[in-house]
Image: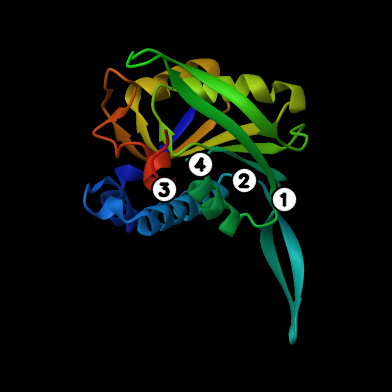
Amino acid sequence: MTIHNLGDTNSLMNKFIAEIRDVAIQKDTMRFRRNIERIGEVLSYEMSKALQFKKSEVTTPLGTKDLQLPTDQLVLCSILRAGLPLHQGMLNYFDDAENAFISAYRHHEGDEDAFEVIVNYFAAPSLEGKILVLADPMLATGRTLENVLKALKDHGTPAQIHIVSVIGAQAGIEHVEKVFPENTHLWISAIDPELNARGYIMPGIGDAGDLAYGAKL
């Protein structure tokens, strides 16, 4: 897997990351969603550089101009519900992409730290020969992405897979490297060193879904 860690270089995106991490600023749910969306836009722009392009002629009012335009057919797949703001950021740039949505959540038995990842909703077009882009803002243990990959198999074999995440844990990234195809790309804005006992990224941001849309039962 090829890892593109945009946090390794200084950019305006660091401001968006700082605000979604900040315990005071992240309480503004509208700002939190917008920052995730903006991060999705930045990651999409960087990811676009790895796609296929071909020369096309564009007619202007005063003549013609040759431009290099993208040719890949993308399917953006959002992991509900936390992936929705990130998905929207990507869709702002890849506005002609097809879309897929999958529900994957952690199920804890009582107060136990151990959990299983349950997938119970999936809507997608054919993935055969297309570029599959998985939007998962928090790449923690990597088990959610592993289960999503298994659920996608009946919808065809994509030509390539790109994972777009906001923050990841080193252990989760290493797990994804083991279970995803070798030609997978990971586009990520920050990598944190560890997970806590319940599988949350440390220092991370907390629960991205709750921060974006409110606490759940």
Against 159, is 59 above or below?
Answer: below
Q: Are marks 1 and 2 in contact (CB under 8 Å)?
A: yes
Quadrant of res 99: top right
Separation of disc 4 and disc 3 at Cα? Answer: 10 Å
Asked if residue 86 lies left or right of residue 13, the reply is right
Instruction: Estimate how packed mark 1 is, as few (under 14), some (14 to 19) or many (20 or more) residues with alpha carbons within 10 Å.
Output: few
For the residues labelled 4 and 2, the Cα–Cα distance comes to 22 Å
First reached walking from the N terminus: tag 4 or tag 3: 4
Q: What residue sits right under mark 3 in the picture?
A: 212
The kind of residue tagged 1 is: Thr
**Which label sits in the foreground, 1 or 4?**
4
Q: Which residue is mark 4?
A: 83
Tell me what residue is drawn at x 32 percent, y 27 percent.
200
Label 1 – label 4 distance at C-alpha: 25 Å
Describe the element under mark 4 as helix, strand or loop: loop
Asked which secondary structure carries label 1, the reply is: loop
Counting the numbered discs, the total is: 4
Residue type beneath disc 2: Leu
Tag of residue 28: none
The residue to which callout 2 is attached is: 51
- Do the residues under discs 4 and 2 have CB atoms within 8 angstroms? no
Residue underneath mark 1: 71
| Distance between mark 3 and mark 2 Cα atoms | 30 Å
**Of the pair 58 and 127, the residue shown nearer to us:** 127
Estimate how packed mark 3 is, as few (under 14), some (14 to 19) or many (20 or more) residues with alpha carbons within 10 Å: many
Q: Position of residue 169 (x, y in %)?
A: 34, 28
Instruction: Classify mark 2: residues with Cα within 10 Å, few (<14), some (14-19) or many (20+).
Output: some
Observer-side mark, 1 or 3, equals 3
Residue 185 shows in the view: yes
Indicate the amino acid at tag 4.
Gly
- What amino acid type should be assigned to the residue bearing mark 3? Ala
- For this orientation, the residue located farthest to the bottom is 62
